Image (cartoon, helix red, strand yellow):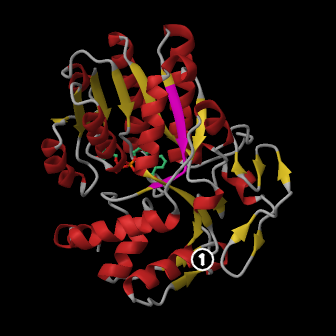
Amino acid sequence: MRILITGGAGFVGSHLALLFKRDMPDSIVISLDNLKRRGSELALGRLAAGGVEFRHGDIRNREDLSDVGNLDLLVECSAEPSVQAGLAGGDRYLINTNLVGTINCLDFARTHGAAVVFLSTSRVYPIAPLRELPLVATQTRFVIPSGSAGAGWSARGIAENFPLAGNRSLYGASKLCSELIIAEYVALYELRAIINRCGVVGGPWQMGKFDQGFVVFWAARHLFRGPLSYNGFGGAGLQVRDVLHIDDLYRLIRDQIAQMPVHNGKTYNVGGGAECSVSLAELTKACAERTGQRLTINQQPETNPVDIPYYVTDNSAVTAATGWSPQLAMSAILDDIFAWLRKHRRELEVILK
Ligand SMILES: NC(=O)c1ccc[n+]([C@@H]2O[C@H](COP(=O)([O-])OP(=O)(O)OC[C@H]3O[C@@H](n4cnc5c(N)ncnc54)[C@H](O)[C@@H]3O)[C@@H](O)[C@H]2O)c1
């Protein structure tokens, strides 16, 4: 197998590259990345030590891809992954990477008859209907009351048939556009492809920022000190996300590519699920317990136009199709992140502080 991971020095891409190489040592695994994300440069040593070949390249340039040569599998993990990207008006990088660059990857895979796994996002679901879920506030979080349900949602979370009408952020729109193009390539050009709409993914080597990678960001602020605030939805930190450990995501993708004919052309919601969800207020408590730091969290009641109060993945479809379900609980994900932050404090503090 020759496997190309685009965005292969990023959080998801570097893990997948190293785990593929670990489990298929005879394969050639190539990570291509333009190192746009601060901190991705730290992956280069890990990739080399793990036997992964690194190519400095940009998916916006077709030539950078064609230099890679033959291919059996392309896992598209490169992106401007912030839902807030483009809010200030500059959306060219986002569109040219997340949409045009992805199409370059699809063309490249098609040329070589390679299969594609596309890392999409829960942010393809529109903002207004997610804000209209009948959420109830408890002391620490928003919940969907058990028993209530509607089109594509229930107390289990958000399913693939959640209605798609409405705006969703430029980030979400760029990913949904890519999904539509992938469906056409599958139908017209016989490209083999799987789409995973991921909720929040977490784990070591995520260069968490306030607008992407919030679990690492919160943990790092507690450990290295720095300001934090509960933004939006009343400013009490009740908003909820589910979190999937990167190792669980890898297990799923490994199983999917082993059964490509079964999953070809399919789109799955993939996440930690209701059992592995957390609110910001609960995350603060968990971080304080692990660090002994009780930070004063600022409160910003105004809600950002692209923010949503609640997203939990309903994994029913992917579990039924693959038998996969997440194994690592929120406490294990946090323990893993804190162990990594402590071990690599010197190199991480300058990036994450
Ligand atoms: N991490 C999450 O919680 C999450 C959730 C849902 C979906 N996703 C998706 O998973 C994928 C990976 O996300 P991540 O968390 O690893 O993000 P990341 O920012 O850590 O990794 C993305 C990598 O892509 C690289 N990159 C950016 N533009 C590029 C370009 N034009 N050419 C080549 N490389 C480029 C960056 O340098 C970075 O190393 C993305 O597509 C993201 O949208 C991530």
Q: In this view, does 159 lie above or below 127?
A: above
Asked if residue 125 lies left or right of residue 339, the reply is: right
Q: Which residue is drawn at 64% across and 74% down?
A: 238
Farthest residue, direction right: 147
**Residue 17, horizontal then vertical, whole percent:** 28, 38
Q: Is residue 349 above or below residue 258?
A: below
**Residue 192, horizontal then vertical, whole percent:** 48, 17
Q: Residue at x 34, y 40 (%)?
A: 16
Q: Residue at x 73, y 37 (%)?
A: 161
Specify the quadrant that holds the C terminus: bottom left
Asked if residue 286 lies left or right of residue 274, the reply is: left
Name the residue beneath numbered marker 1: 237
| Amino acid beneath label 1 | Gly
Element at label 1: loop
Q: Is residue 188 above or below residue 181?
A: above
Ligand 1 occupies quarter = top left
What main secondary structure does the magenta stretch of the protein show? Answer: strand
Q: Residues within 10 Å of mark 1 (few under 14, many from 20)?
A: many
Asked if residue 292 lies left or right of residue 284, the reply is: left
Q: Residue at x 30, y 48 (%)?
A: 10
Q: What stretch of residues is rendered in magenta?
A: 194-201
